Amino acid sequence: MGAYYAVPSDSLVRFERYAKNDNTAHFSGRFTVSGSYVYGWVEEGIYSWFKLYFVPDKQIAARLPHVADSEPVRELLFTNQEDFIAAVVSPVDAAKLKRRQIESITGRATLNVDGYWINVECGVEYYGVKFLSVSGPMTVDLKQDSIPASHC
C-alpha cells in the first residue's frame, strides 16, 4: 500500500492513476511553474555524480498534490532532464561543468511542464514533471560549489 496524498482544491493537476508496481501516483495536466533550478556535481566521499532539481515558488508548490501530513513540494525532478539541460544550459557552460571548471549551475526560470508524479522511497518523497519548454526570461549563475548529497 502506498502513501496517502493531499490534493489542494485549486490543484494544477488531477489524479490519473496509481502504479502499484512502483508506488507512484500519477497526475495529469499541463501547467506553468516558476522557481529556481540547481544542476551540478554532488560529492560524497570517493563518489561524484550529476544532480538536477527544480525548486518551485511557494505559491505554485501550494497548488500541487503532496504526501499527506507533509510539507508542500520542495523540489521537482524531471522525467526528461536531458531536454531541460539542453534548453537551459549553454553548450559552453555544459562543457565547463563536465570538465569541472565549475561545480554547479543555478538560476531562475519559468517553465511549461506536463504531468506530475509522486513517489515515496526509503521514506523520502520524490516529485516530478515532464519538462516542455522555458516560458519567459531566466537567469544563469555559474558556481564553484558542489550540490549537497541527500540520503534515504
Image (tube, rainbow, N blue to C red):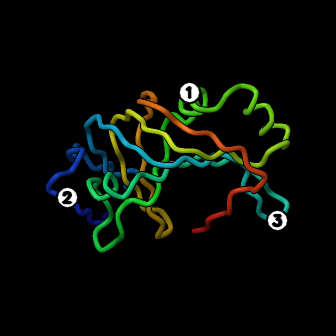
Would residue 130 appear left or right of 41 to someone viewing this image?
left
Quadrant (top left/top right/bottom left/bottom right) for the N terminus: bottom left
- Look at mark 3 in the image and give the residue it sits on: 45
User: Alpha-carbon neighbours of circle 3 within 10 Å: few (<14), some, or many (≥20)?
Assistant: few
The part of the image, by quadrant, that contains residue 73 is bottom left
Residue 39 appears in which quarter of the rendering?
A: top right
Q: Is residue 21 left or right of residue 11?
A: right
> Residue 87 bears which disc, if any?
1
**Foreground: disc 3 or disc 2:** 2
Q: Nearer the viewer, residue 72 or 130?
A: 72
Dot 1: few (<14), some (14–19), or many (≥20) neighbours within 10 Å? some
- What amino acid type is highlighted by mark number 3? Gly
Residue at coordinates 37% horizontally, 55% vertically from top-left? Answer: 23
Within 10 Å of the Cα at label 2, are there few (<14), some (14-19), or many (20+) other Cα atoms? Answer: some
Mark 2 vs mark 1, foreground winner is: 1
SS for tag 2? Answer: loop
Identify residue type, mark 1. Ala
Name the residue type under label 2.
Pro
Which residue is at 46% across, 70% downward?
Answer: 123
Tell me where residue 121 appears, x and y as whole percent: 47, 62
Please name the residue that numbered disc 2 is placed on. 8
Q: CA distance from mark 1 to mark 3?
A: 31 Å
Q: Residue at x 47, y 55 (%)?
A: 75
Q: Secondary structure at mark 3?
A: loop
Looking at the rendering, which quadrant does residue 142 occupy?
Answer: top right
